[in-house]
Image (cartoon, grey):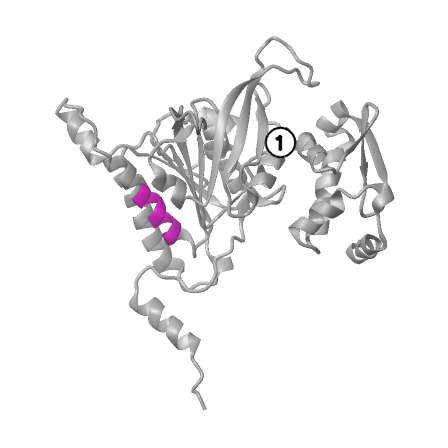
């Protein structure tokens, strides 16, 4: 008789003898909203979730496209509301306390830590020291009892290398011969591995530049391919002008920015989906922007004349409104769709939930009726 293999003994031997290895799976359990339901859904597959702890997320785009607004603003504020402690590593020296407070961030030292950094080595040193102390203090506790932390680096593009600093001090700027790209790759790849088993998230902003490749005109993310390969989630952002009033009517005056967010990479949803997020200057990000267009494209709404109709797959009720009313979430109509979608997803898988949500009143079949009764 063949002696059975003891996986527990093997696992303990591996994790004990090789430093930095974790056993088992590390599926995310905590998510932080970006502040826009559509963007959340395109990243995570859920309207409320957004970006996960335990992974590396990068928001990359041109100046003024809304990267810092989402990463150092919305994510930090929403993390605080969930009891997640945010740490901002600011390499651009552009985050004003008054601006953070204006969008709802609590800047008191017991709720937020902000550090000015200039080099990739600074970020690596802070993360290494923190994770080492975190492991020593909380490593033996149950995962649900460990504190939750969100690191935000704004931005990777402004970080320099020791070579840059030395050349600046000598007033002899010759470039770093690719050292920065290698340093950023090492930073991101090591961070991915070090935070995976802990309640720690890492979000970074980065710059893009125009591509010179006629066959691939998309903007290029700075810092080399290592950042692209190592990151779990990458959102590419492009700045457009927002020329609409509060009712969605076209005007000539610029009222804010439209940030076109393209999901370059995601481990939790389909890549290459995009949404235009509206950020008016006077009111801040519209959490519902892009949601009407997405659910219309998915067939959840059907057009009847000048109106758009939603038929509930749960109780069969029909909701009929004009486009403007849908976009303004009149009577909580968009909230209802999201709530029913999430309710269905608790019972069935992602693809089946999409199919059920896009079923029209005349297409409801016995199997769906039975499912509705099960949900209720």
Classify the position of the C terminus by image quarter.
Answer: bottom right
Taking the image as shown, residue 371 lies to the left or right of residue 3, namely: right
Tell me where the magenta segment starts and ends, as one range.
185-194
Q: Report the front residue among 371 and 121.
A: 371
The location of residue 87, given as percent across then percent down, is 41, 40
The location of residue 99, given as percent across then percent down, is 47, 25
The location of residue 197, given as percent across then percent down, is 43, 57
Taking the image as shown, residue 18 lies to the left or right of residue 94, namely: left
Pointer 1 residue: 287
Q: Residue at x 42, y 75 (%)?
A: 8
The location of residue 312, given as percent across then percent down, is 81, 42
Residue extending furthest front?
Answer: 215
Residue extending furthest bottom?
Answer: 1
Quarter of the figure with residue 231: top left
Q: With respect to residue 3, does 212 lie above or below?
A: above
Q: Residues within 10 Å of mark 1 (few under 14, many from 20)?
A: some
Q: Does the magenta stretch include residue 92?
A: no
| Residue 113 in view, yes or no | yes
Q: Is residue 189 magenta?
A: yes
Q: With respect to residue 94, does 37 lie above or below?
A: below
Secondary structure beneath disc 1?
loop
Q: Report the front residue among 148 and 170.
A: 170
Q: Which residue is drawn at 54% across and 39% down?
A: 78
Q: Please, what is the dominant secondary structure of the magenta stretch?
A: helix
Residue extending furthest left?
Answer: 170
Classify the position of the N terminus by image quarter.
Answer: bottom left
| Residue 328 in view, yes or no | no
Could you tell me how many numbered marks the image carries? Answer: 1
């Amino acid at each position: 008789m063949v002696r059975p293999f003891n996986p527990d003994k093997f696992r303990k031997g591996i994790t004990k003898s090789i430093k930095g290895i974790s056993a088992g799976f590390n599926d995310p359990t905590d998510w932080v909203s970006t502040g826009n339901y559509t963007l959340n859904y395109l990243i995570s597959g859920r309207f409320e979730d957004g970006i996960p702890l335990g992974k590396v997320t990068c928001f990359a785009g041109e100046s003024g496209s809304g990267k810092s607004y989402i990463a150092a603003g919305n994510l930090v504020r929403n993390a605080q509301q969930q009891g997640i402690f945010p740490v901002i590593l600011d390499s651009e020296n552009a985050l004003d306390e008054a601006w953070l407070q204006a969008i709802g961030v609590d800047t008191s030292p017991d709720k937020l830590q902000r550090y000015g950094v200039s080099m990739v080595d600074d970020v690596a040193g802070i993360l290494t020291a923190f994770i080492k102390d975190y492991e020593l203090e909380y490593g033996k506790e149950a995962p649900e009892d460990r504190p939750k932390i969100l690191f935000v680096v704004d931005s990777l593009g402004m970080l320099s290398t020791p070579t840059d600093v030395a050349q600046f001090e000598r007033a002899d700027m010759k470039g770093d011969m690719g050292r920065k790209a290698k340093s950023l790759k090492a930073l991101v790849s090591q961070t991915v591995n070090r935070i995976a088993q802990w309640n720690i998230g890492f979000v970074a902003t980065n710059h893009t530049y125009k591509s010179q490749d006629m066959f691939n005109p998309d903007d290029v993310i700075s810092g080399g391919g290592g950042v692209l390969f190592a990151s779990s989630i990458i959102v590419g952002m492009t700045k457009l002008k927002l020329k609409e009033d509060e009712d969605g009517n076209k005007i000539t005056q610029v009222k804010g920015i439209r940030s076109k967010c393209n999901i370059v990479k995601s481990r939790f949803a389909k890549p290459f989906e995009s949404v235009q997020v509206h950020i008016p200057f006077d009111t801040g990000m519209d959490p519902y922007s892009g949601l009407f267009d997405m659910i219309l494209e998915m067939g959840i709404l059907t057009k009847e004349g000048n109106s758009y109709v939603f038929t509930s797959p749960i109780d069969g009720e029909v909701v009929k409104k004009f486009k403007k009313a849908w976009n303004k979430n009149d009577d909580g109509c968009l909230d209802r769709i999201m709530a029913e979608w999430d309710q269905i997803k608790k019972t069935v898988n992602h693809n089946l939930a999409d199919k059920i949500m896009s079923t029209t009143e005349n297409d409801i079949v016995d199997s769906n009726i039975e499912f509705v009764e099960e949900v209720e």
